[in-house]
Amino acid sequence: MTSLEYLEAVKRRLGITSDYALAARLGVTRSAVSKFQKGAVFGDDVALTVAEILGVEPIVVIAAANAERAKTPEQKARWTGLMEKFSAPVESFRNLLSQW
């Protein structure tokens, strides 16, 4: 997922409709949320907050943000690999639990 997709997921999860409320919940300025919506990638602290809100393994969101920021294909591949490594077991476990 991209930073923007994560922000939209947070808004849905919390029932937030305004960017101002989203900024307050993430501990950033309204201006920062506007920058995220225009393509800026949030830092690790915001990624950690997003992960906590969504109940996602924090390293998955942090790795996704770093993959977005990567300057070379090699860097992007390393972060994407880390993201996939940690998200696959979590998804498998969630799927198993949903069957019960």
Image: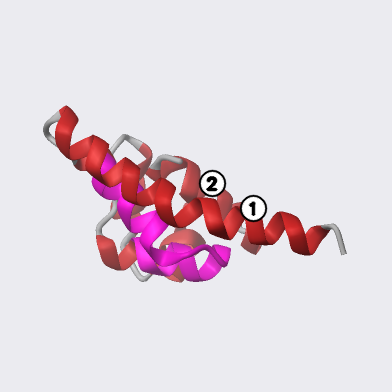
Towards the viewer: 53 or 21 = 53
Residue under label 2: 8
Q: Residue furthest top?
A: 73
Towards the viewer: 32 or 54 = 54
Residue under label 1: 12
Towards the viewer: 18 or 44 = 44
Question: Picture coordinates of residue 40 (x, y %)?
Answer: 26, 42
Q: Relative to 42, does residue 5 appear above or below in the rendering?
A: above
Q: Amino acid at mark 1?
A: Arg
Q: Relative to 13, does residue 49 appear above or below in the rendering?
A: below
Report which quarter residue 48 is drawn in.
bottom left
Q: What residue is shown at x 48% (from left), y 60% (from top)?
A: 22
Question: Picture coordinates of residue 4 (x, y %)?
Answer: 43, 41
In this view of the protein, can residue 12 be seen by the observer? yes
Which segment is the magenta one?
A: 47-67
Looking at the rendered structure, the secondary structure element under dot 2 is: helix
Does 97 sit left or right of 69 as displayed? right
In this view of the protein, can residue 41 be seen by the observer? no
Q: CA distance from mark 1 to mark 2?
A: 6 Å
Q: Amino acid at mark 2?
A: Glu
Q: Quadrant of the C terminus?
A: bottom right
Question: Picture coordinates of residue 99 (x, y %)?
Answer: 85, 57
Does 79 sit left or right of 90 as displayed? left
Q: Residue furthest left?
A: 71
Magenta region, main secondary structure? helix
Q: What residue is shown at x 41% (from left), y 62% (from top)?
A: 23
How many C-alpha atoms fall within 10 Å of the one at disc 2: few (<14), some, or many (≥20)?
some
Question: Picture coordinates of residue 52 (x, y %)?
Answer: 49, 71
